[in-house]
Amino acid sequence: SAYVYMHTNILISFTLMQFTDKRFQPVHDLTIGVEFGARMITIDGKQIKLQIWDTAGQESFRSITRSYYRGAAGALLVYDITRRDTFNHLTTWLEDARQHSNSNMVIMLIGNKSDLESRREVKKEEGEAFAREHGLIFMETSAKTASNVEEANGIKIGPQHPTPSSTLSGSQGGQHAGGGCC
Amino acid sequence: MSLPQVTMSQAPSFEAEPSADTVVPDQESTQEVPDVSIETASTLESFEQPQSTEGTTSDNSAKADTTTVSEQSDHAAGEQEVICDQPVSLGPDTEEEVESSPQETDKSWVGWSSWGKSILSSATSTVGQSLSSVKVKAGEALRLHRTSVGEEAQEDGGVEGGADAAESAHSVDSPTSNRGVFSSITHAGKSVISGGLDALEFIGKKTMTVLAESDPGFKKTKILMEKTASLSQMLKEAKEKERARLCNQPISAPSPHYGILFDDYQGLSHLEALEILSNESEVKVQAFLSSLTETEQEEVKTELIFIKEIFIRQEDKEAQEEAEVHEGEAEVSKDNASDSEEFLSVLTELLFELHVAATPDKLNKARRRAHDWVSEVERPVTTDTVGRETEDHLNKEALDEENKNGENEQEKNEETSEETKEKDPRSVEAVYESSVSSLAEVTARSIEQLHKVAELILHGQEQEKAARDQAQVLTRLTCAMCKEVKALAKKFSDTLLYVGSPKKAEELNPLVDSVLQEGSNSTNYIQNAFQLLLPVLQISHLQSQHCHNTTQAEGATPNPSPAFLIV
């Protein structure tokens, strides 16, 4: 069981992978409950597996996804900067995550699709303010341009969790954007 | 016994550290300790013994004083710098300590091995050897450090005896040299400890295997022990072990491990998630029952038991069916052609009957891939000269496959053949690899299917179908999955036998057995996953049948207990 040092760049590059992967999936089913992704990363010469639990964003699945928070090492709360409704839902998801996870779970707020400036509905400042208010780490990313991957490099975002395989819940604020995430 | 001692001696070094930091230049000098001490050692040898007790006492005081004295004595030390550079202090003390510890280690290790002898007569021969080797290693490590420490001590004596004026400097210096000594001891201690732990682990492993070998009953208890843990945990451990093993032996033959592949296909995660839902539902069921009056309880319990019986009956049915399959194996192979369509339609139909919006897409795709590569392997290639006798038979089979699968399949086949051509998909290794991989994939997808069904049942829109009916449908669904996995395992082993026909039986049989074994494991996993659905159906039944009020209340104020009770 390896200690997991979570660096933001890992998380971000993971979301990247997730999102880009989805883009290339010809048929993107609506997430039922939870879907899984995994990625091997190397930190300090150690191979560590990041197991991502991508929970459904639909409101009706909330009672089920709640069950999965427990034991997660961290959570990525992702909203779409081009859709205000995804930002508006953040509070409820955050409440759920806080209430049903262990107390030291690191939560990171991610405003995705920062490349689509023209269609932006949520200002960066709003995201920053929300993160500050709730003690989250904030970042805007673009899966398309891979922006912020370098910038985030090396910021350790949490205590090191001695978990056999770390679990991350990626909650997508609001509904899953079908198909084109980027 | 000796281990704590070594660690004890390590402790003061931490105390000494902060004060040592104040004397920056001396820190460097400690690194030179070995060189200097060797030079001076021979000339000062005579001082060693008489001084040792004095050394201890002065050290103790030195330690206590350092923090206060260090600043004042810095001035005094300035003149004596040449002498101060040479490490002084704690030497004798630690020397004694270190000297005694190897003896004690010896004793304790002997004690260990004799203890081992008395209890595990059969295990000792091997364990004893490892112990003695560890003992020797530990001894060597300690002796090595002892000599260097001893030499420092000799110097120490020399300094003290030669110059009284150095005393103040001495007290300043001691922390730093302590540090040097201690760090070396720490190092030795670490190697002893890690060596000791390795030995203990080794003993444990040996004992387990020796016991297991001599006592077949123990194996049973081991299995029992494992059964109490959750399946996903068990599989996870097995997978991690295998991964560790593979890392240690990079040159080993490409033997695909089912557990690792199963995890790669996310089977483990789905199983884990299903277990979470199952446990949570179980807690909810129990909580609901305890909230009822006794008479109500009895009533509800009978309903729940009714659902449970459907689940249990399934196991019996499975056993029966298995027997039937064995009898009519010939029929099964005849059915093969129509099988593929049938599986999908059965699956779709059953899922439809469940009244949950789950589609068998992924499972069906995985299954199709499995069939595809088999037909690809069995399809004769012009240049290939694998067994002329079987070629005709295969020709026919391949044609059947093609007819059945249509043009799309053919396209796919071409794609895959392009991909795999370099690897030679007809080699026994490749076929074995594909077999295990396909079994892992189909099993993972089956468990995913059951997990999705569980989620959708819990998601519970309108309960259109009674839980007992759903239980029955699920039973049939699981049966269909298991049957399919069995058929696949059979098909894979046949393919293995076919491509491996020029090979010797000794070479081939283990692989064939292994494929069949993984096939039966796969059905076990699926059945285990199915059993996890029982509490899910039970809570779904309770929520639909009893007190809509309570469930609504639960929804409004989420009961925190379920989420936090699961371990």
Image (cartoon, rainbow, N blue to C red):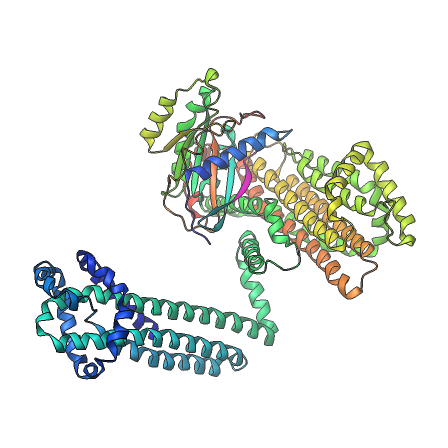
Q: Which residues are magenta?
A: A31-40
Residue B31: quadrant of the picture: bottom left
Which residue ends up furthest to the top in the rendered image?
A: A118
Residue B48 in picture, x, y percent from top left: 21, 81
Q: Residue at x 58, y 28 (%)?
A: A23
Q: Main secondary structure of the magenta part?
A: strand
Residue B25 in picture, x, y percent from top left: 20, 58
Up-down relation of residue B1 to residue B463 (above or below): below
Q: Residue at x 55, y 53 (%)?
A: B236
Q: So how many labels did they put on this image?
A: 0
Up-down relation of residue B336 to residue B405 (above or below): below
- Work out whether residue B189 or residue B520 is closer to the camera in this orientation and state it: B189
| Residue B20 relative to residue B420: left or right | left
Up-down relation of residue B533 to residue B225 (above or below): above
Up-down relation of residue B367 to residue A77 (above or below): below
Residue B150: quadrant of the picture: bottom left
**Which quadrant is the N terminus of chain B positioned in?**
bottom left
Q: Residue at x 77, y 61 (%)?
A: B508
| Residue B76 relative to residue A123: left or right | left
Q: Is residue A39 magenta?
A: yes
| Residue B23 relative to residue B137: left or right | left
Q: Is residue A50 visible?
A: yes
Residue B407 in picture, x, y percent from top left: 82, 32
- Work out whether residue A67 or residue B182 is closer to the camera in this orientation and state it: B182
Residue A148 in picture, x, y percent from top left: 43, 30
- Work out whether residue B303 or residue B517 is closer to the camera in this orientation and state it: B517
Q: Residue at x 65, y 44 (%)?
A: B446
Q: Is residue A4 magenta?
A: no
